[in-house]
Image (cartoon, rainbow, N blue to C red):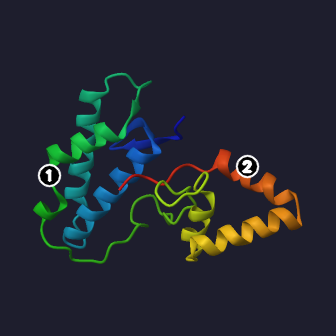
């Protein structure tokens, strides 16, 4: 089961899974920082082209845009490097106005479900220290086990790179 999000691209509504949304947001941010500071027209044109390609590949508004569709669209538009050298530092708050620092379950560094590694990455800690603290808390207070199980069920996996 994957989490989905409704997005508006160039005035058209799409439903995307979270991996696809994260990849598209990073891609558009990377292109945006390579364009001149006040060049909003080019970004508008790129977003319109993205929406057009999405409509070609996913004709029904009830279908979900997947990571593969986004990857194919990015290949058609071109690499961000094709738009020039980066003029500004990467800023994840350019699109949508919110910070992309989110809590995820780890895909790679996981012992059971990746919850402890995800929490460790979010707070900038060592995963082994968070695991030890979680085990100690489970033995000290039983509620920690329920919190872990809830986080396991609720947290999405981190987006694939």
**In the depicted view, which residue is nearer to us: 71 or 25?**
71
Say which label, 2 or 1, has the lower sequence index.
Answer: 1
The residue drawn where x is 22% and y is 40% is: 72
**Secondary structure under badge 1?**
loop
The residue drawn where x is 41% and y is 36% is: 13
Q: Which label sits on residue 78? A: 1
Q: CA distance from mark 2 to mark 1?
A: 41 Å
The image position of residue 40, as x and y in percent, is 25, 61
Residue contact at pointers 2 and 1, CB within 8 angstroms: no
Q: Quadrant of residue 76?
A: top left
Q: Is residue 67 shown left or right of residue 127?
A: left
Q: Is residue 122 shown left or right of residue 30?
A: right
Neighbour class for label 2 at 10 Å: few (<14), some, many (≥20)? few
User: What quarter of the picture does the C terminus occupy?
Assistant: bottom left
Q: Quadrant of residue 145?
A: bottom right
Residue to which mark 2 is pinned: 150
Q: Is residue 71 shown left or right of residue 152?
A: left
The residue drawn where x is 54% and y is 34% is: 1
Q: Quadrant of residue 41?
A: bottom left
10 shown above or below 40: above
**Secondary structure under badge 2?**
helix
């Amino acid at each position: 089961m994957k989490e989905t999000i409704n997005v508006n691209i160039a005035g058209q509504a799409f439903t995307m899974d979270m991996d696809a949304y994260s990849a598209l947001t990073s891609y558009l941010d990377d292109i945006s920082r390579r364009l001149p500071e006040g060049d909003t027209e080019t970004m508008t044109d790129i977003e319109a082209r993205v929406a057009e390609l999405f409509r070609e590949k996913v004709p029904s508004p009830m279908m979900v845009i997947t990571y593969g569709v986004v990857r194919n669209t990015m290949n058609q538009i071109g690499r961000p490097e094709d738009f020039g050298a980066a003029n500004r530092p990467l800023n994840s708050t350019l699109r949508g106005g919110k910070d992309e620092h989110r809590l995820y379950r780890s895909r790679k560094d996981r012992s059971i479900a990746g919850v402890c590694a995800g929490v460790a990455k979010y707070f900038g800690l060592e995963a082994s220290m968070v695991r030890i603290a979680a085990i100690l808390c489970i033995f000290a207070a039983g509620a920690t086990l329920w919190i872990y199980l809830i986080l396991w069920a609720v947290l999405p996996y981190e987006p694939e790179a």
